[in-house]
Image (tube, rainbow, N blue to C red):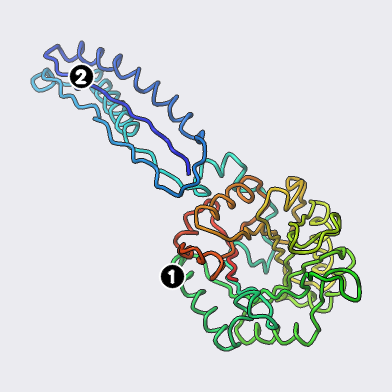
Amino acid sequence: MHRFSKGYIVNHLRSSLSTRTFTFLMLAFLALPLALASCADDKAHQPDAQTRNGAAAETVKKENAVSAAPEAASFAPKTTATRTNDKAFANASSAAKAAAAPKVQYKAGEDPAYAKKCGWPVNCPAPLPGSILPRKRIVAYYGNPLSKRMGALGEYPKDEMLRRLKGEAARWEKADPLVPVQPALHLIAVVAQGEPGKAGKYRMVMPDAVINQVYGWAKEANALLFIDIQTGHDDIRAILPRFEWLLKNPDVHLGIDPEFNLIKSRKKPGTKIGTYDAADINYVSGYLRDLVKKYNLPPKVLTVHRFTRNGVTNARSIVLRPEVQMVMHMDGWGAPWLKRDSYKDYVVSEPVQFTGFKLFYHNDTKKGDPLMTPQDLLKLDPKPIYIQYQ
């Protein structure tokens, strides 16, 4: 949250001087607050130290605006010069009033001036025909049908899960009716493991039957399917081609999870947070680009989970391709203030292309905090275009 404080006081002038003398003095007097207002506006976009207690910023009180009515004007005809001076006075008065108005107080991740300073909106390739983003907002349920603890996709029976997803989609469409919602199922198709397993890679690839089952659920709900890869100690370059059979479908997209990419550190998943470099992400987007061209597909959406500084390294070197729509997805859980801070620090501060935001039904609320609403997330700048529920 950033605090801004600024006020301008312009004393009321009352004078019985002639119109021309009064106007000259008034314009000279107004020059000082207008100059100060210009300097203060530039300074107002520099945030103070960020506070993490979630308290609302203090409201800046409105100061008195300029108010003056030259007595001479009531009995003297208006010459051209007088009209010009009156117009200058009115413009100066309006500027002084604007300067005196309180500035909007933004919470972390919501300030458009900060987003613009960081480089939003991003200069990226124009959407190709068939592109989903930003024409639609994707709302997804994440998880695995073999586990009730990995997310909403597997927590509920299929019919109830799809009904809940439909309800979330409706809430988003009501909150932002100008952006249609595209529902999706986000399946963890490669799951990081605490044990090395037969391959010694600390990951488990889901059987094709499980993947096809969830793909069938997605089709039933007119939803997209995302497959999510947690590599463990495997290399994304080795494991991604295994899914060409699925990714060649136009309604199947991809997610990769730096948290569980531990090939460099060789640590067990769950004991250390992993990382992807821009070079890894560029390989993945290049692979998807080639599939789009090979099978004549609409652009693929690629989500990259992130909630730490080192979760993605050299983000400025990520290559944008017309065939791939890149979503940097804020994946951390916690209180609303912490999630906004994470979004600001790790997503807004390093622009790539589009942004996403994850909501945890249980972890976000287990300490008594409320689950963030669509209205809360729509205050963020930039507004996330991919929403995931776990």
* Relative image position of residue 129 (x, y in whole percent): 68, 66
Q: Looking at the picture, which amino acid does disc 2 mark?
A: Thr
Say the numbered circle drawn on residue 174: 1
Q: Nearer the viewer, residue 12 or 197?
A: 197
Say the numbered circle drawn on residue 163: none
Task: Name the side, left or right, on which 258 lies relative to 338.
Answer: right
Toward which corner of the image does residue 63 lie, by quadrant? top left
Please tell me which residue is depicted at 51% across the width and 66% down the height of the picture. Answer: 366
Please tell me which residue is depicted at 65% across the width and 82% down the height of the picture. Answer: 218
* Relative image position of residue 305 (x, y in whole percent): 69, 60
Say the numbered circle drawn on residue 79: 2
- Image quarter where the C terminus lies is bottom right
Mark 2 Cα shell of 10 Å, populated few (<14), some (14-19), many (≥20) = few
Q: Looking at the picture, which amino acid does disc 1 mark?
A: Lys
Task: Name the side, left or right, on which 134 lies relative to 129.
Answer: left
Task: Name the side, left or right, on which 157 lies relative to 299.
Answer: left
Q: Nearer the viewer, residue 384 or 343?
A: 343
